[in-house]
Image (tube, grey):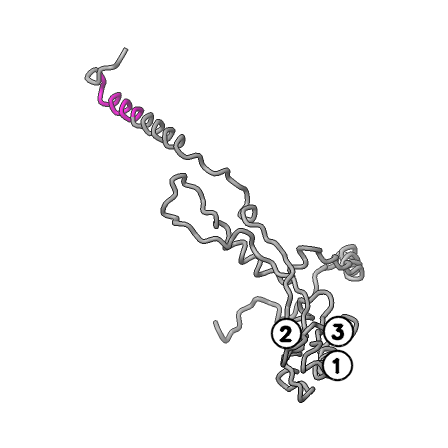
Amino acid sequence: MFLNKGDLSMRDRASYFSARTLLCGVFFLGVGACGTAPKTPWGLPGDQHKIAVEQKPERLALALSPHTAELTQRQKEALMGYAAAYLDHGYGPLTISMPQGSDTAMAGRHAAQQTQKVLHAAGVDWAVIAKGDYQASGTTGSPLLLSFTRYVAHAQGCEQQWRNLATSPGNNESDNFGCALAINTAAMIADPYDLVRPKATDAASTARRQTVMDKYIAGEVTSAARSSDDSGTVSDAVE
């Protein structure tokens, strides 16, 4: 049995058209959903682009001359900066490689000894400095090579090009969605090696803990004393 719109009151007629519009909307949404299946949703932004850690060699080449074995002042300054980088984020041995078979072979051996002394003076332990040769037969002007290993963090899957975000028939998120968060997080990690092997937690200060407990038992204030410099009072000069 079908209703005649002429038999409906104004209020019933409004309800009739509202219900009809709602049913039509649901129908067309269902048809659209059947056309393109949405991507499977993932959880947190970090689940889409994981942060990976990899080893990266940090190298330095010092030019050599067959006529002199002395390091220049500029080279010594470069070595000081290189030693600071090793102490900050270097792992494993710091290797000094001398050219073998080159016209700078003899100069390279003398320069390697000076390099060791400069590195040690900058704080690098003798035990981590390793020396070796690399094959340079038949070459001229071969340099002295230094290298150590560092760890770097990067976001996986963020190297691909962005697609046109204005065209998305399935209304899915971009493949690069979450890359900004992952890249910034990777850049803020002070030592990526902590993701490979976390550092051990330092032991708690038992002396400070006992001091606080003694004050608590005695009913005294357990917080440290504060000076006027620690207060949040605004100076009269800026009021």
Report the front residue among 181 and 73: 73
Task: Give the CA separation, mark 3 to mark 1.
Answer: 9 Å
Where residue 238 appears, as percent x and y from the top left, is 48, 73
Question: Label 1 amino acid?
Answer: Gln
| Magenta stretch bounds | 8-20
Real-space Cα distance between discs 3 and 2?
14 Å
- Element assignment for label 3: strand
Q: From this viewpoint, which residue is outermost toward the front?
A: 138
Label number found at residue 58: none
Find numbered disc 1 in the image and state the secondary structure of the residue it sits on: helix
Residue situated furthest top in the rendering: 1
Residue located at (39% from left, 32% from top): 35
> Does 17 appear in magenta?
yes
Mark 3, residue position:
131
Q: To which quarter of the image does residue 171 belong?
A: top left
What is the magenta segment's predominant secondary structure?
Answer: helix
- Circle 1 residues within 10 Å: few <14, some 14–19, many ≥20: few
Q: Say which residue label 2 marks.
A: 60
Q: Is residue 140 magenta?
A: no
Q: Nearer the viewer, residue 189 or 58?
A: 58
Say which mark, if any, is on residue 113: 1
Q: What residue appears at the point 70 percent right and 77 percent down from the top-left corner?
A: 101
Q: Is residue 83 left or right of residue 168?
A: right
Q: Whole-percent x and y of residue 213? A: 78, 56
In terms of sequence position, does the residue under pointer 3 or pointer 2 come before the other? Answer: 2
Q: Position of residue 41 (x, y in %)?
A: 50, 39
Distance in Å between CA atoms under marks 2 and 1: 16 Å
Write down the quadrant of residue 27 in the picture: top left
Q: Earlier in the sequence, mark 3 or mark 1?
A: 1
> Does 195 appear above or below 146?
above
Position of 138 relative to 21 (above/below): below
